Image (tube, rainbow, N blue to C red):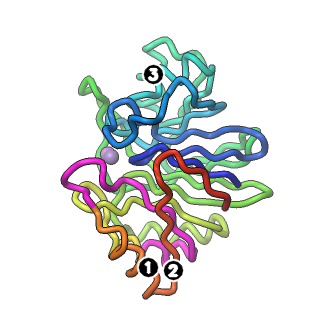
């Protein structure tokens, strides 16, 4: 599976020939100035919650590409109100069979409001399951015992976890999260973008290694194969 990192918590994967883009926040990210949002392809845009640093570029990319927005009910309807015609509302605990595989929405411990202050529903994590690989994207979340449920739902090949601390879990809790979801491979996101979440990369990777786990921190714009 190809995984491309666009900075902060934004990444895309190609699954069963479909391009899934997660939490697009690029044009407002000073670290991602080299990324042109007009060049990003997407069949689906998955939004973990309503915060601006996860949805800022979703409308523009969805309108250009015709991608379907997948989000919790409140976030999906907010985008419907902006003229997005293709959207799929979901909520915590729900799953749906899409043409790229099965998507299950799981709990995230965080908050959610939209950029104009509208109620943003409950924040979500996502499990993507298909014939190739399964993975878990935690969204913005604290470490939570709910993560122990994830191995009951799917055998995870890798997890995309926030590591920046302050707004979400940091590296110590992310190590515990990897153990709970039972994966050895973690892609770190939600770090460095703002002053509050500046992260020591070597220390973070070292801590994972000490725990016999691997933390990958792809460069912004880099594509890795998982
Ligand atoms: Ni957030
Ligand atoms: Mn965030």
Q: How many angstroms separate mark 3 from mark 2 (CA)? A: 38 Å
Quadrant for the C terminus in the image = bottom right
Label 1 sits on residue: 208
Figure check: 171 above or below 12: below
* Mark 2 closeness class: few <14, some 14–19, many ≥20 residues within 10 Å: some
Where is mark 2, residue-wise?
213
Q: Secondary structure at mark 3?
A: helix
Label 2 to label 1, Cα distance in Å? 5 Å
Judge whether 73 appears above or below 218 on screen.
above
Q: Quadrant of the N terminus?
A: bottom right
Quadrant of the image occupied by residue 68: top right
Asked whether, in this view, residue 94 is left or right of residue 101, the answer is left
| Disc 2 residue lies near ligand 2 with CB under 8 A | no
Identify the element where label 1 is drawn: helix
Labelled disc at residue 160: none
Q: Is residue 197 magenta?
A: yes
Residue 93 in the image: x percent, y percent?
Answer: 53, 52
What residue do we see at 19% from left, 52% from top?
195
Which residue is disc 3 drawn over?
A: 79
Which residues lie in the magenta part? 176-198
Which circle, 3 or 2, is nearer the viewer? 2
At label 3, counting other C-alpha atoms closer than 10 Å, the crowd grade (few under 14, some 14-19, many 20 or more) is some
């Amino acid at each position: 599976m190809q995984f491309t990192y666009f900075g902060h918590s934004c990444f895309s994967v190609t699954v069963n020939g479909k391009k899934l883009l997660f939490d697009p926040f690029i044009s407002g990210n000073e670290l991602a100035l080299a990324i042109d949002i007009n060049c990003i392809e997407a069949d689906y845009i998955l939004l973990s919650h309503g915060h601006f640093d996860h949805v800022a570029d979703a409308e523009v990319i969805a309108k250009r590409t015709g991608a379907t927005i997948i989000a919790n009910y409140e976030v999906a309807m907010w985008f419907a109100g902006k003229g997005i015609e293709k959207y799929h509302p979901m909520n915590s605990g729900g799953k749906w069979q899409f043409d790229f595989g099965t998507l299950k929405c799981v709990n995230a411990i965080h908050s959610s409001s939209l950029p104009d202050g509208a109620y943003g529903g409950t924040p979500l994590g996502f499990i993507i399951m298909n014939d190739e690989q399964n993975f878990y994207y935690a969204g913005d979340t604290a470490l939570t015992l709910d993560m122990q449920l994830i191995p009951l739902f799917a055998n995870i090949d890798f997890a995309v976890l926030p590591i920046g601390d302050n707004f979400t879990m940091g590296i110590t809790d992310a190590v515990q999260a990897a153990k709970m979801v039972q994966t050895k491979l973690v892609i770190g996101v939600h770090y460095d973008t703002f002053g509050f979440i500046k992260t020591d990369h070597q220390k973070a990777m070292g801590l994972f290694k000490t725990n016999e786990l691997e933390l990958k921190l792809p460069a912004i714009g880099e594509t890795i194969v998982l």
